[in-house]
Amino acid sequence: MSRQSRHHGNAPNPGSLVPPLLSWFAGAARDLPWRRTLDPYGIWISEIMLQQTQVKTVVPYWERWMGELPTVAALARAKPEKVLKLWEGLGYYTRARNLQKAAQQIVQQHGGTFPATFEDIVALSGVGRYTAGAISSIAFNQPKPILDGNVIRVLTRLFGIADDPRSKETNARLWALAEELVVHSRQLAAPALPPQFRAAGPCSLLNQALMELGATVCTPRQPKCAECPVKSSCTASLTGRAESFPRLAPRVSATSLQFAAALVERKGCWMVQQRPSGVINARLWEFPNVEVTAGSSDTLRHLRKAFGLARQKLDHFQTVRHTITRYRITLDAYSVSLCDSGSLPKLTGKWLPLEKLEQLPFTAAHRRLLDNLVRSSSSTVAKT
Ligand code: SF4
């Protein structure tokens, strides 16, 4: 990558943006728990959790995780179910599995010490260029660039880049600009942050400043340009077009999927199944369910047929709607109580009481069903 990107028209000189970004961050940085540590392990966990998840959601997850699995070694030897349980609710479970794989890699290849070079970090399972750049710069103050959705928004606005940032050429140009900024920061003194933050070098602070600006000031809608430390150099703001950047090509539209689930109870236990390895949400638990034609108005009939529940009384329990990546999912759940121990040949799984189910990692939609079951069973107990 060229260290010197081409500067177009009236676009600012990247080097001139660095000092105001650094001093702004010293005064505006949010006090987040992972900003109090220089431990690359904790920074890595925070970066993976923050992908497509809001800061306020991540804080309690990160604190619980660091309490239960405080080191690379603890993560490497933890039971996979425990790792998934700590991740439950964040979605994208492949990330949790990759975290454990990478921890095992660090133990085997680096004696349990978190690697300190970009090349070794990017070789870890589940770590891409962005995450490796974030860890190298934030934990080790190396001049490695970062480019995520927030930084793309800031840079396309500052430099007035109107092409689709996902196109190969524009993406490369944005990485080059991000690199130019962080390389420039290396020669400057790091401003002092309030005492609760870890002492960090200028490359660390510059990359964090870009992320923070995108998250809190240069927001997708109604950016707060009046509060922005680089407003006097910003191409988009100076021409009154901040919200028209970045110009993303439209994404493919979402696909609808529909499922029917059976909450089958017998003698105070509920049947659950574990998803196999190698599929999405592998090894998470869920209630027996079947995919039906999207838009189907008769999910109950499909459920009866799939699980041999032709004669039982099934009551509609809940409809859960949620979205995973580009899938819009509707899950119709029905409850059925079996009063005898008669077998159901088409249903296999484990029979467990609610208190045991609560200890298992569930897929997001089925977790909502379980939470509702727990709520309705405690209100039934309270009434009796
Ligand atoms: Fe974003 Fe406005 Fe700052 Fe430009 S001036 S970087 S549009 S917040």
Image (cartoon, helix red, strand yellow):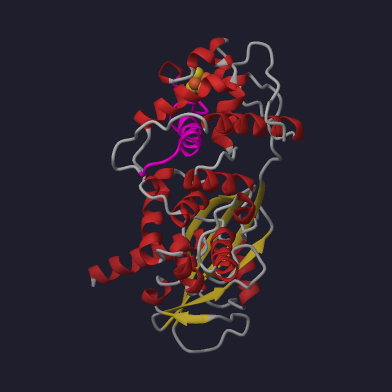
Q: Is residue 143 above or below residue 50?
A: above
Q: Quadrant of the C terminus?
A: bottom left
Q: Give percent across and percent down for residue 252.
A: 71, 40
Q: Give percent across and percent down for residue 276.
A: 63, 73
Q: Give percent across and percent down for residue 34.
A: 40, 49
Q: Tell me if I can see residue 141 in this picture.
A: yes
Q: Give percent across and percent down for residue 212.
A: 45, 34
Give the residue at x 56% y 69%: 104
Q: Quadrant of the N terminus?
A: top right
Q: Is residue 347 above or below residue 114?
A: below
Q: Which residues are magenta?
A: 198-224
Q: Toward the viewer: 262 or 209?
A: 209
Give the residue at x 64% y 52%: 119
Q: Is residue 161 magenta?
A: no
Give the residue at x 58% y 15%: 235
Image-based side of 47 in relation to 281, left or right: left
